[in-house]
Image (cartoon, rainbow, N blue to C red):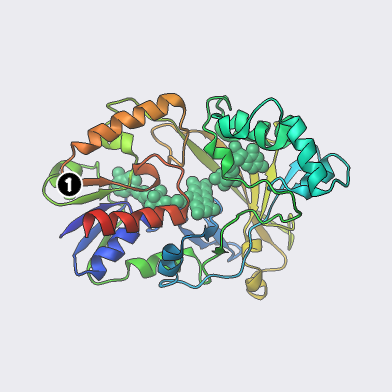
Amino acid sequence: MDLLIVGSGLFGLTIAERAAASGRRVTVIDRRSHIGGNAYSEADPETGIEVHRYGAHLFHTSNPAVWEYVNRFTTFTDYVHRVYTTHRGVVYPLPINLGTINQFFQASYSPTQARALIHEQAGEFESHAAVSLEEKAIALIGRPLYEAFIRDYTAKQWQTDPRELPAEIISRLPVRYTYDNRYFNDTWEGLPTDGYTAWLERMADHPNIDVRLDTDFFDDSQPLHKAATVGQVPIVYTGPVDRYFDDAEGALSWRTLDFEREVVPVGDFQGTSVMNYADADAPHTRILEFRHFHPERADRYPTDKTVIVREYSRFATPQDEPYYPVNTPADRAGLLAYRELAKGEKDVHFGGRLGTYQYLDMHMAIGSALSMWNNRLS
Ligand code: FAD
Ligand code: UDP
């Protein structure tokens, strides 16, 4: 073995694929019973509809190198992601666009008029000076829209004072003064034509790649555990960075999600793939209806039932899957301490969403894995 990779998510699989293609022998371990990390999907047993087990995953990128790379393993459908939100019993389009603004204010503002209105309502904060999510959101969309669509959703999603959350969380979402309600701004987007798992399996399908599932790096009873391998073989570690160091600098805060699946006896439950719930009285943040991710499979999916998933967010305990880094100022200080510790680990390379404590999308995880391979490992 030339390289041990801990975690078979898109970061680990990209490194594994690149290393195998250049003749190295790689072992990938994952504590789960399947490959692919959070991008994994499977056919729902009752309906046959492809379900993303760890929440809706939409692929999008503007990075030509990443787009070229992923197309080696899968083609993509022409699915374009659109999200709607329910506020006080009325459905609005997201991200905030001219349609949302005019519907909310019961008006017919032109782009110029809408800009002037939002500028007035955002007056208390300057966008470029905003450091917290709350300041940034109010600077971008003004207080009334913030209170309707962002404040309570963010409270459910993060349970953290929005003045403590970083502005980048909200900068992910565009604000548009047109009626364009595409959720992403990227050049390319789509869903893997044969599903995520077919894509992920193709990345791992190489004689130089040995995948071992149900294998935890911290389980001393399995041969490839931490104490037996660090310093013996180069390691790419994509699990939680705080867990690697036994929380020596304190546990970083993570959010986890509970997914509540239901099969509903109708052909179409909500008419769209993702419906957000903006208000505090709905305990879930959103409802996913998976059939809508693949309209091109309509003739293969049942017409009398549909699978939906309600998503609930809460703080992760040590027993939970960590999904979202919270990134409060205290977490950022902790992360710096862990980065110092990481420098002292001989030939251990920390990567991916958990290993770097970053809110990475799939294309970012793949892009940073390609950089790590090209610049540090190859
Ligand atoms: P992961 O996919 O988390 O993989 C890490 C792997 O390491 C896991 O399989 C885990 O089991 C394994 N592991 C951890 N600890 C150990 C251990 N001790 N021993 C062995 N194995 C271990 N991105 C998008 O581009 N579009 C989206 O729409 C999107 N939606 C998302 C929705 C949700 C709810 C979440 C949580 C993420 C979403 N993402 C989305 C982000 C996407 O999931 C990540 O970018 C991608 O999964 C990152 O891959 P990774 O390899 O870094 O991490
Ligand atoms: N957000 C919100 N209302 C919405 C959608 C998003 O307040 O209806 C905020 C919320 O803080 C969320 C962030 O914007 O965490 C980023 O949204 P995105 O849809 O990108 O979140 P993800 O899909 O990563 O959970």
**Which one is nearer the viewer's eye here, 218 or 137?**
137
From the image, which quarter does the N terminus lie in?
bottom left
Residue placed furthest toward the bottom: 299
Q: Is residue 79 left or right of residue 147?
A: left
From the image, which quarter does the C terminus lie in?
bottom left
Identify the residue at horizontal 35%, vertical 27% (top origin).
Answer: 334
Q: Position of residue 176 (x, y in %)?
A: 70, 49
Q: Position of residue 331 (x, y in %)?
A: 41, 28
Q: Position of residue 310 (x, y in %)?
A: 62, 46
Type of residue at label 1? Asp
Give the quarter of the image for residue 161. Answer: top right
Q: Visible in this render: residue 37?
A: no
Identify the residue at horizontal 58%, vertical 35% (top origin).
Answer: 157
Q: Visible in this render: residue 170?
A: yes
Give the quarter of the image for residue 350. Answer: top left
Q: Is residue 51 left or right of residue 245?
A: right
Residue labelled with disc 1: 347
Identify the residue at horizontal 67%, vertical 31% (top origin).
Answer: 138
Identify the residue at horizontal 72%, vertical 56% (top origin).
Answer: 180
Q: Is residue 307 left or right of residue 213?
A: right
Answer above or below: position of 52 versus 94. below
Give the quarter of the image for residue 210. Answer: bottom left
Q: Position of residue 160 (x, y in %)?
A: 55, 26
Secondary structure state at the residue bearing disc 1:
loop
Q: Is residue 233 left or right of residue 240?
A: left
Labels in figure, total? 1
